[in-house]
Image (cartoon, rainbow, N blue to C red):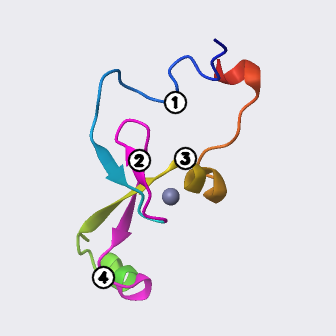
Amino acid sequence: MARKRRSGGRSQSGSTGSVQCSLCGRMVPGDKAIKKSRYTSVVSYKLGKELRDSGTIMPRRQEIQILCISCSIHRGVRKIRSKADRK
Ligand SMILES: [Zn+2]
């Protein structure tokens, strides 16, 4: 049978639990979901800059976004690749 991807778009074999997409709420398998993390400041940018200039060490907060495939393509996190690339 023809396969679109060797791994079926998953990173692990066997069952992993399902997680919820943080944008649309769809349930996605844990190994198929796309995890995107970014660091945000606790305070606003202007205040943070002022504090950084005075030598304060600013705490950062990590935000993890879990996306389903269709949301990640819609948002441009993952691109659609050509047939040769994805095999
Ligand atoms: Zn989604």
Residue at image position (49%, 65%) is 24
Mark 2 and mark 1 in contact? Answer it, CB < 8 Å: no
Which is more toward the observer, 37 or 43? 37
As measured in the structure, the alpha-carbon distance from the residue carrying label 2 to the one carrying label 1 is 12 Å
Magenta stretch holds residue 46: yes
What element does badge 4 sit on?
helix
Which amino acid type corresponds to the residue marked 1 in the rendered image?
Gly
**Which of labels 2 and 4 is toward the front?**
2
**What range of the chain is rendered magenta?**
24-47
Which is more toward the observer, 14 or 67? 14
| Label 1, ligand 1: CB separation under 8 Å | no
Looking at the picture, how far across and down is residue 63, in whole percent? 34, 62
Mark 1 and mark 3 in contact? Answer it, CB < 8 Å: yes
According to the picture, the residue beneath numbered tag 1 turns out to be 9
According to the picture, the residue beneath numbered tag 3 turns out to be 69
Drawn side of residue 87 relative to residue 14, left or right: right
Looking at the picture, how far across and down is residue 71, in whole percent? 57, 56
Magenta stretch holds residue 71: no
- Which class describes the residues within 10 Å of circle 1: few (<14), some (14-19), or many (20+)? few
Indicate which disc, 1 or 3, sits on the residue closer to the N terminus. 1
As measured in the structure, the alpha-carbon distance from the residue carrying label 4 to the one carrying label 3 is 39 Å
What element does badge 3 sit on?
helix
Indicate which disc, 2 or 1, sits on the residue closer to the N terminus. 1
Q: Which mark is residue 28?
A: 2
